[in-house]
Amino acid sequence: MNMSDSDKKLHNPTMRVINILEEIDKSPNGLTLSELSERINSPKSTILPILHTLLLNGYLDVDEKLRYKVGIRTFLLGVSNYLDLRGLKIIEKEMESIVEACNEVCQLGKLVDFDVLYLAKVDSNQPVKLVSSVGKRLPAYATALGKALLSGCSDQEIREHYGDKLKPFTSKTVTDVNVLLQQIQEIREGKLAHEFGEINDEIGCIATPLKRGSEVVASISVSFPLYRATNEKLQLIETTLREKRPIIEELIKKLCLNL
């Protein structure tokens, strides 16, 4: 069906909602009302009712510092056409058993445009404040989940995307792509992915890729505050992830789960 010139004109109020969601999605730490107003060049009085409506309907979240972030409804809307939500629930049961064994947070992610898209999270009964959350995207190179996922990419693909230098998030972030590639090669050879304070200087993470055949389709991790990172704890996490990996991979294969 051909559209007339009048039909092709953009609807400004709708574009404002789109701009709000896109700007918030691009900001891992969220945006305040003032920051958002400046980003999209729109008055705070105009934006606030939109934020309130999106918040009440679950399309946005807001933290204690009044920073707006992408909500779970936005995430589900974006993935519902290609993600097997039934399969996700089945995997979450296995994640719960990982949390029971380690008493730390377990997360599941997939690679989207060289970012980790966080698909699921199971909390422990011990407090831990993470940068990540379900529906959020973070640069793969700075997270253990992401490094596990990047093990399914070729060195050439990684170099072409990142170039030579990687943006640091903390003083511990790997910024040399050659160091990153060395870590990824070790993961391909069977080591688990590790990250200690690279995206959040107080948090560590260990992850393993999940494969369907030879293809890396997702990764699963355990995150913990660095002050709890004893040798015994790290060994427990590694052992648990290695035990659970083939179980989850078999579920992915048998149930033909789309992650």
Image (tube, rainbow, N blue to C red):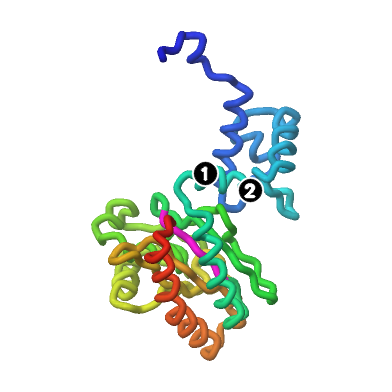
At x 34%, y 64%, the residue is 212
| Magenta span | 106-111
Q: Residue 202: tell me if it is visible.
A: no
Outermost bottom residue: 232
- Coordinates of residue 170 in the picture (x, y in percent): 52, 65
Q: For this rendering, which residue is in front, 113 or 93?
A: 93
Q: Quadrant of the N terminus?
A: top left
Percent x, y of residue 51? 70, 38
- Quick check: 241 left or right of 103? left
**Residue type highlighted by circle 1:** Gly
In the visual, does 90 lie left or right of 46? left
Q: Nearer the viewer, residue 118 or 67?
A: 118
**Residue under pointer 2:** 71
Whether the magenta-drawn stretch holds residue 109 is answered as: yes
Where does residue 18 sit, x and y in percent of width and height?
57, 32
Q: Which residue is mark 1?
A: 78
Q: Residue at x 45, y 69 (%)?
A: 144
Residue 52 drawn above or below residue 228: above
For image coordinates 46% across by 85% down, the residue present is 239
In the picture as drawn, the residue positioned furthest to the front comes out as 254
Q: Residues within 10 Å of mark 1 (few under 14, many from 20)?
A: few
Taking the image as shown, residue 100 lies to the left or right of residue 158, namely right
Q: Is residue 156 visible?
A: yes
Which amino acid, by three-letter code, is at mark 2? Gly
Front residue of this view, candidates 244 and 208: 244
Looking at the picture, tell me which residue is in the foreground, 113 or 173: 113
Element carrying mark 1: helix
